[in-house]
Image (cartoon, rainbow, N blue to C red):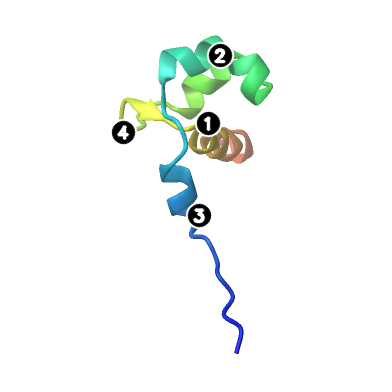
Amino acid sequence: MAVKKTLNTKARVSNAPRYELAELAAHAKELFEVRAEVLAGAMYGAAGELFTVTEVKQKIEQFMKAKVV
């Protein structure tokens, strides 16, 4: 009987390097293809000081898809 191993997404994210928001903002165009202002808006009020690239990408996607009222 074969057992299929699956990796938990959060387990993979926890092993990823974490960066300060200022460092990510300095490279926003290269990493996320957005301006630093978009990154600042997406991360406004985010808890924590260090973030993974994946976490920031998800926040930016949510921010860009948000409906404007």
Q: Secondary structure at mark 2?
A: helix
Determine whether, in the image, residue 50 is placed left or right of residue 53.
Answer: left
Q: Amino acid at mark 1?
A: Val
Residue indicated by mark 3: 9
Residue at 42%, 19% in the rendered image: 21
Dot 4 or dot 3: first in sequence order is 3
User: Which mark sits nearer the N-terminus, 3 or 2?
Assistant: 3
The extreme front residue here reads 1
How far apart in space, not on screen, are marks 3 and 2 (Cα)?
Answer: 27 Å
* Residue in the picture at 43% in, 52% down: 11
Sequence-wise first label, 1 or 2? 2
- Front: mark 1 or 4: 1
Disc number placed over residue 36 in the picture, else none: 2
Q: Residues within 10 Å of mark 1 (few under 14, many from 20)?
A: some
The kind of residue tagged 4 is: Ala
**Residue located beneath label 4 in the image:** 47
> Which residue bears the numbered disc 1?
53
The mark nearer the N terminus, 4 or 2, is 2
Question: At numbered mark 4, what does the secondary structure look like: helix, strand or loop?
Answer: loop
Where is residue 14, by image quadrant?
top left
